[in-house]
Image (cartoon, helix red, strand yellow):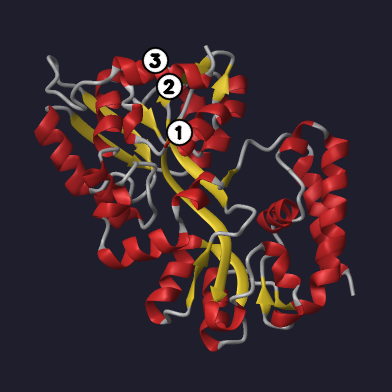
Amino acid sequence: MNFRNSLAVSTLALSVAIVGLPANAETLRLLTWGGYAPEDVVAKFEAETGHKVEVTKSNNEEMIAKLRATGGGGFDLAQPSQDRIAGPQEEFGIYKPIDMSKIDTSLFIPSMLEATGENTTLGNDVFGVPHIWGTSGLVLDTSKAGMVKDYTDLCSDDVAGKVSYRLKRPTLIGFAFAMGLDPFEAYVDEAAYSEVMAQVEAKLIECKPNVKTYWGGGDELMGLMRSGEVVASMAWDTGGWKLNADNPDITFVAPASGALGWVDTFALPAKGKADEAAYAWINFVMQPEVAAMITAAAGNFTASKGADEFAADDLKARFQTSFPPEAIDNIKWYPPVPAGLEAIEGGVLDRVKAAN
């Protein structure tokens, strides 16, 4: 069964209440990121379902290490990024398939659910569904750089000397898409990917005179934008919204070729013992009102459809301005990176940095 068909089956199978009181309450051992399971959400879940939640905060590397050490034991639900599922699963077998009939797919933004499913499917099995997401794209002073619509517009004479971006892989990927190339499609062919990167390298070297500086940290970029030394940059969405709170002319803009998106998922460890509680938690936190509580704690939005309507008014306004529905559907979600490609990218970045 392909992912599209599994969604149809799950929607038909789950047309009843999202969370009901279980016959036998379980303790859910949740391996997650800071802010993803705030205390008020945990308390609400426990009161409404009878299940208990034990939260362990972690990150991608630690999650994989913990699950690898136990063969997928010790936890009932984990939250790795979508590009950290297929590879570790093939190598270590640390997850078990998700029963999509137990997921209320109507709660999810469809394009995110489909993209995450495709990126975490092995054979006929889906191993991840989306939860928290974020993007990188353009952060602009719209009063001075309103003509910038895509990554390659950072090379325009209109913003010469007032541009900044990182010398990191998101810049390579973003410029490739803006140049009409598809780097993710080229992932399967190292030679094809090298050709894509060669074209991006030439463009970035050509664009180098426009760059005020290559920023290394978020505080540095924010200082450059606030001072007016930089009016157009590549950066993340939450950084743009933070700047917007201080200066309404500065905000995050989704590029015409698509923002670059990451997703932290829900995945079931192979030896988890509380699947009922795990599915109950997923369906509970994807309810729009509950998802908005998590956004308030984590700072990022979730894949819950309509949850932005329940966010704080200022954050909701920034989100809806940056991400109309067509911009969400146009996000380019990072797939797993095949071995060997990072070495190609590293060579490109080194040569761009060294170029005169």
The x and y percentages for residue 192 are: 85, 38
Q: Quadrant of the C terminus?
A: bottom right
The amino acid pointed to by label 1 is Leu
Left or right of 108: which side holds 328? right
- Identify whether 284 is placed above or below 15: below
Q: Which residue is mark 1?
A: 113
The amino acid pointed to by label 3 is Val
- Mark 1 or 3: in front is 3
Left or right of 208: which side holds 303? left
The amino acid pointed to by label 2 is Leu
The x and y percentages for residue 245 are: 37, 76
- Disc 1 on helix, strand or loop? helix
The x and y percentages for residue 355 are: 88, 70
Q: Badges 2 and 3: C-beta atoms under 8 Å apart?
A: yes
State the image quarter where residue 311 is shown. Answer: bottom left
Pointer 3 local density, CA inside 10 Å: few below 14, some 14–19, many at least 20: some
Q: Which residue is mark 2?
A: 7
Q: Gap in Å between the C-alphas at discs 2 and 3?
A: 5 Å
Q: Which residue is mark 3?
A: 9
Q: Gap in Å between the C-alphas at discs 1 and 2?
A: 9 Å
- Identify whether 192 is placed above or below 127: below
Give the residue drawn at x 62%, y 71%. 233
- Disc 3 on helix, strand or loop? helix
